[in-house]
Image: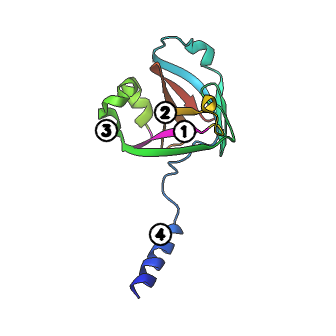
Amino acid sequence: MNAILKYMIALAGASFPASANADFIDTQWSVVGFTGEAWFIDAQDVIGQSQTFNRGFAEGVFYNCDYAGQSSTYTRYDNDEFFANPEFELFLPLHEEMTLSSDTLFVHRITCEGEGNPAQRRVMYPFVTNEARKSAWYLFEGGVFSLYKP
């Protein structure tokens, strides 16, 4: 009887969608700005370009993976917890923009295995989204690129 009850609870929980689609990255993102210090990259050359994710495929200005073992995971942070983390210090100037319509931020790590070829392995981290699902931010060198989903 106990096993049946656990099964029914699990089934009921799985049938309700999550309130936030935290794992949402699959779309075409447009790079719209840069805040911080660019060390080697010319940020103006990147602004206006795009980054696309579509299941196991990615193509864009920051990261590419042509169905070569792409995976992703994320960590959920309350806004205050995110901005208190020293790892995310470079995001501080974007605090208002990132928290305007969201109480939670999602830090994604996206990897491409490269079909066994070490030269093709890639990691994109941290790629940050929020509950509003229209904006994203990517830490690169000494600053943060802002992306928008049109």
Q: Which is closer to the viewer, label 2 or label 3?
A: 2
Most frequent secondary structure within the magenta stretch: strand
Work out how far the residue at label 4 is from the one at label 3, CA to CA, in angstroms.
29 Å
Give residue 80's mark: 3
The extreme right residue here reads 66
In the rendered structure, the answer to whether residue 121 lies left or right of residue 82 reads: right
From the viewer's perspective, is residue 4 above or below residue 88? below
What's the residue at 54%, 21% (across, down)?
33
Work out how far the residue at label 2 is from the one at label 3, CA to CA, in angstroms.
20 Å
Task: Look at the image and say whether residue 107 sits in the magenta stretch.
Answer: yes
Q: Earlier in the sequence, mark 1 or mark 2?
A: 1
Amino acid on which disc 4 is placed: Gly
Amino acid on which disc 3 is placed: Asp
Q: Earlier in the sequence, mark 1 or mark 3?
A: 3
**Residue density around tag 1, few if under 14, some if 14–19, many if 20 or more, within 10 Å:** many
Q: Which residue is mark 1?
A: 110
Q: Which residue is mark 4?
A: 13
Q: Which residue is mark 2?
A: 125
Task: Tell me the quarter of the image containing the C terminus.
Answer: top right
**Residue density around tag 4, few if under 14, some if 14–19, many if 20 or more, within 10 Å:** few
Q: Position of residue 54 (x, y in %)?
A: 67, 43
Contact (CB < 8 A) between labels 1 and 4?
no
Task: Look at the image and say whether residue 143 sits in the magenta stretch.
Answer: no
The extreme bottom residue here reads 1
Amino acid on which disc 2 is placed: Tyr
Work out how far the residue at label 1 is from the one at label 4, CA to CA, in angstroms.
27 Å
Displayed quadrant of residue 44:
top right
